[in-house]
Image (spheres, rainbow, N blue to C red):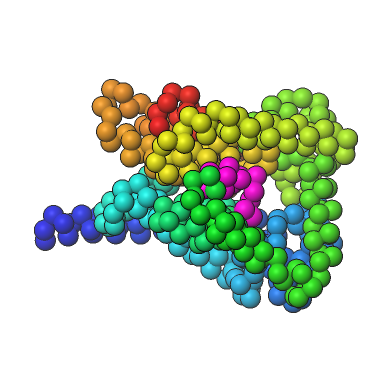
C-alpha cells in the first residue's frame, strides 16, 4: 500500500477511537439528559414541561433551560431513556465533527482531507468535551450553531448566519458577544436581523398557544428566578462564582439540593450573588466593546469569532465545566498559528494540552467520585478561561 493509503487508514483508526471514546464516556450515566428527557416526554404528550413537581426526584429547583433546548432534545424522547441517551450522543457527535470541519474550512479556506481532519479532531478532544458527553449536555449543539453562523457569515450568507445565531442564543450568556461580532461584521444587517428573529422565534412557536400555552413560559421564569437566587453550583466556572465560593455568601449553606452539586442558599444571599455576577458580565461585555473589539476587529473573521466565544465563556455569569467546549475554535486558531512559530517561542500550546490531559483524567475520576470533585472541576475550568485570556494579553492573535 502507498503512504497515502497508510495515512488514511491511520486517520480512520484515530477517528474511530475518538468516536468510541466519546460514545462510551456517558453510556451508563444519565447526567443532565434526565431532566431533558422528563421535559421532552411531557412536551410530546402536550403537557407542561416546566411543571416543577416533575423534577422533585431529580432537581429540587425544576427545569430552567430555555424552550429551544427542550425542542432540540424532544425527538430522542420518543424512545425509552436507555435508548434515547445513545441516540442523543450520536447526534451530538455528528454535530461536533461537522463543527470541526466548518472551522477547518474557515481557517484554511479549502476542503480538508481525512488525515488532517482526524488530527484536528484529536486536537479538539478537550476535557470539557468529554464532560459534555458524560452529562449529555446541549452545549455541543450550541457549539455547532455558533460554528454554522461563523461559516455562513464567511460565505456571505447573512440570512442563514442570522438563523444560526438565533438558535445558538439558547445559551445567550455564552454566545452574546459572538452574535454582536457577527452583526458588526456583516454588510447586510437587515437580512441578518431577520434571520436572527426567525431563529429565535421558531423554537418558541410551540409555546405560543399552539402545542402549549404561553403560561408555560411564566412557569419557566419562576423556576429561573428560583435557580438564580436560591441555588449555587459548586462547578460554576464563572470567575465571580469561583471568588464567591470563599465568602460566607455561599459558604454558609442551609441545605443541599437533591441533584448533588447544587446547594440551596437564602434568597437574600442568592440575589446579592446574582447581581454581582450580572454586573461582572455587563462589565466584561463593555470591556470587549471598548478594548477587545477595537484591538482585534482587524483580524480575520475566524480569529475574531473564536475570541468572542472564549471571552463570553470567561465572563459568563452562569456556566459549567462542559461549556468549555466553546474554547474549541480558539484552540484551532492557536494550532494554526503555532505551525508558523519556532519551537522555542511556541510554549503555550503544549502547556495547555498537558493541562488538558490532566483534566481529562479528572473527568474520568469524577465519573466515580463526582460529588467530591465538583469544586475542583469548577476551579480547573477557570484555568481554561485563563488560557483564553492569555491569548489576548500576550497578543498571540
Q: Is residue 111 left or right of residue 224?
A: left
Q: Is residue 292 visible?
A: yes
Q: Residue at x 71, y 75 (%)?
A: 44
| Position of the N terminus by quadrant | bottom left
Left or right: 242 as drawn, with respect to 105:
right
| Residue sitting nearer the eye, 267 or 184 | 184
Instruction: Report the residue at 63% width, 32% height from top.
Output: 286
Q: Residue at x 49, y 46 (%)?
A: 185
Q: Residue at x 49, y 64 (%)?
A: 90
Residue 196, image x, y percentages:
60, 58
Residue 282: in magenta span: no
Of 68 and 62, the residue lying toward us: 68
- Give the quarter of the figure containing the C terminus: top left
- Viewer-proximal residue among 260 and 328: 328
| Count of residue discs | 0
Q: Which residues are magenta?
A: 169-182
Extreme-left residue of the structure = 2
In this picture, residue 341 sits left or right of residue 29: left
State yes or no: residue 176 in magenta: yes
Q: Main secondary structure of the magenta part?
A: helix
Q: Quadrant of residue 38?
A: bottom right
Please tell me in which quadrant of the rendered image residue 163 appears. bottom right
How far across and how far down the image is residue 13, in percent?
Answer: 30, 57
Q: Is residue 134 visible from the viewing direction of this image?
A: no
Q: Position of residue 55 (x, y in %)?
A: 79, 59
Height in image: 187 above or below 269? below
Q: Quadrant of residue 337?
A: top left
Give x and y (percent) for residue 352: 43, 32
Amino acid at each position: 500500500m502507498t503512504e497515502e493509503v497508510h495515512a488514511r487508514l491511520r486517520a480512520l483508526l484515530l477517528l474511530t477511537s475518538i468516536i468510541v471514546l466519546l460514545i462510551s464516556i456517558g453510556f451508563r450515566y444519565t447526567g443532565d439528559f434526565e431532566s431533558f428527557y422528563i421535559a421532552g416526554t411531557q412536551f410530546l404528550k402536550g403537557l407542561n414541561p416546566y411543571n416543577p413537581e416533575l423534577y422533585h426526584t431529580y432537581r429540587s429547583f425544576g427545569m430552567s433551560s430555555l424552550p429551544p433546548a427542550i425542542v432540540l432534545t424532544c425527538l430522542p424522547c420518543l424512545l425509552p431513556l436507555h435508548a434515547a441517551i445513545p441516540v442523543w450522543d450520536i447526534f451530538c457527535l455528528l454535530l461536533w465533527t461537522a463543527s470541526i470541519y466548518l472551522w477547518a474550512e474557515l481557517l484554511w479556506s479549502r476542503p480538508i482531507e481525512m488525515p488532517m481532519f482526524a488530527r484536528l479532531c484529536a486536537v479538539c478532544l478537550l476535557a470539557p468535551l468529554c464532560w459534555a458527553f458524560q452529562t449529555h449536555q446541549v452545549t455541543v449543539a450550541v457549539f455547532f450553531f455558533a460554528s454554522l453562523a461563523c461559516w455562513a457569515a464567511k460565505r456571505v450568507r447573512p440570512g442563514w448566519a442570522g438563523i444560526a445565531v438565533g438558535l445558538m442564543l439558547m445559551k445567550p450568556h455564552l454566545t452574546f458577544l459572538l452574535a454582536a461580532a457577527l452583526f458588526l461584521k456583516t454588510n447586510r444587517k437587515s437580512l441578518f436581523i431577520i434571520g436572527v428573529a426567525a431563529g429565535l422565534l421558531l423554537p418558541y412557536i410551540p409555546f405560543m398557544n399552539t402545542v402549549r400555552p404561553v403560561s408555560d413560559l411564566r412557569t419557566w421564569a419562576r423556576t429561573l428566578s428560583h435557580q438564580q437566587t436560591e441555588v449555587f453550583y459548586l462547578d460554576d466556572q464563572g470567575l465571580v462564582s469561583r471568588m464567591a465560593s470563599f465568602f460566607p455568601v455561599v459558604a454558609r449553606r442551609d441545605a443541599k439540593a437533591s441533584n448533588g452539586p447544587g446547594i440551596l442558599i437564602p434568597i437574600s444571599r442568592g440575589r446579592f450573588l446574582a447581581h454581582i455576577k450580572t454586573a461582572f458580565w455587563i462589565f466584561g461585555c463593555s470591556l470587549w466593546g471598548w478594548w477587545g473589539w477595537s484591538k482585534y476587529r482587524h483580524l480575520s473573521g475566524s480569529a475574531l469569532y473564536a475570541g468572542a466565544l472564549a471571552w463570553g465563556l470567561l465572563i459568563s455569569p452562569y456556566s459549567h465545566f462542559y461549556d468549555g467546549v466553546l474554547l474549541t475554535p480558539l484552540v484551532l486558531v492557536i494550532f494554526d498559528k503555532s505551525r508558523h512559530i519556532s519551537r522555542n517561542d511556541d510554549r503555550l500550546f503544549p502547556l495547555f494540552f498537558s493541562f488538558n490531559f490532566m483534566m481529562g483524567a479528572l473527568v474520568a475520576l469524577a465519573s466515580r467520585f463526582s460529588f467530591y470533585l465538583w469544586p475542583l472541576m469548577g476551579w480547573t475550568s477557570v484555568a481554561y478561561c485563563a488560557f483564553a485570556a492569555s491569548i489576548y494579553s500576550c497578543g498571540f492573535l
